[in-house]
C-alpha cells in the first residue's frame, strides 16, 4: 500500500500559439484549465511467478483532488505491469 502525490503545473502559452480565445474554442485548449494536484491511495500486489520476473498490479483511488478550472478527473486507476528484474553480477 502507498500514497502517491501528483502535481501538474498550469500550462503556459506565452505567445498565443496553442489557444484561440474565440467562443468556439475548446475548454481543454485553454491553458488556465490545465494543472492541479491529487493524492491517491494505492493498494497493490506483486507476484514473482518466475526467476527474475514479476507481475505488478495496483489499484489507485483519489483521496483528494484540486484541479484548475474545468477538467475531467478519474474516479480510479488500475495499473498492471510486468517489470523485469535485472541480475547484477559482481566481479
Image: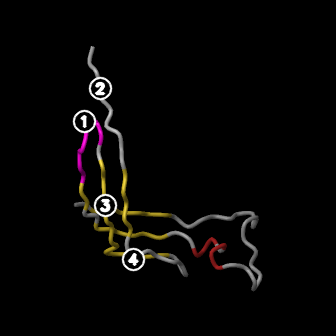
Q: Does label 3 or label 4 sit earlier along the sequence?
A: 3
Say above or below: 8 vs 81.
below
Percent x, y of residue 41 = 28, 68
> Which secondary structure lies at badge 2?
loop
Q: Residues within 10 Å of mark 3 (few under 14, many from 20)?
A: some
Percent x, y of residue 90 = 26, 18
Q: Which-is-in-front pick, marks 1 and 3?
A: 1
User: Where is mark 3, residue-wise?
Assistant: 58
Write down the region rendered in magenta.
46-53
Labels 4 & 1 near each other (Cβ < 8 A): no
What's the distance in space between the residues labelled 4 and 1, CA to CA? 35 Å
Residue 14 or residue 22, whichever sits in front? 22
User: Where is mark 2, residue-wise?
Assistant: 88
Residue at (34, 68) in percent of width and height: 39
Residue at (31, 57) in percent of width and height: 57
> Which secondary structure lies at badge 4?
loop
Residue 49 or residue 59, whichever sits in front? 49
Percent x, y of residue 53 = 30, 40
In the drawing, what numbered circle is on residue 51? 1
Q: Which-is-in-front pick, marks 4 and 1?
A: 1
Q: Does label 1 or label 3 sit earlier along the sequence?
A: 1
Image quarter of residue 52: top left
Image quarter of residue 6: bottom left
Q: Quadrant of the C terminus?
A: top left
What's the distance in space between the residues labelled 3 and 4, CA to CA? 14 Å
Q: Is residue 64 left or right of residue 12?
A: left
In the drawing, what numbered circle is on residue 75? 4
Q: Does label 4 or label 2 sit earlier along the sequence?
A: 4
Amino acid at each position: 500500500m502507498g500514497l502517491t502525490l501528483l502535481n501538474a503545473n498550469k500550462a503556459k502559452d506565452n505567445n498565443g500559439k496553442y489557444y484561440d480565445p474565440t467562443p468556439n474554442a475548446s475548454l481543454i485548449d485553454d491553458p488556465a484549465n490545465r494543472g492541479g494536484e491529487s493524492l491517491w491511495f494505492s493498494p497493490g500486489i506483486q507476484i514473482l511467478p518466475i526467476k527474475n520476473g514479476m507481475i505488478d498490479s495496483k489499484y489507485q483511488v483519489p483521496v483528494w483532488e484540486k484541479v484548475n478550472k474545468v477538467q475531467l478527473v478519474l474516479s480510479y486507476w488500475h495499473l498492471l505491469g510486468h517489470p523485469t528484474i535485472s541480475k547484477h553480477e559482481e566481479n
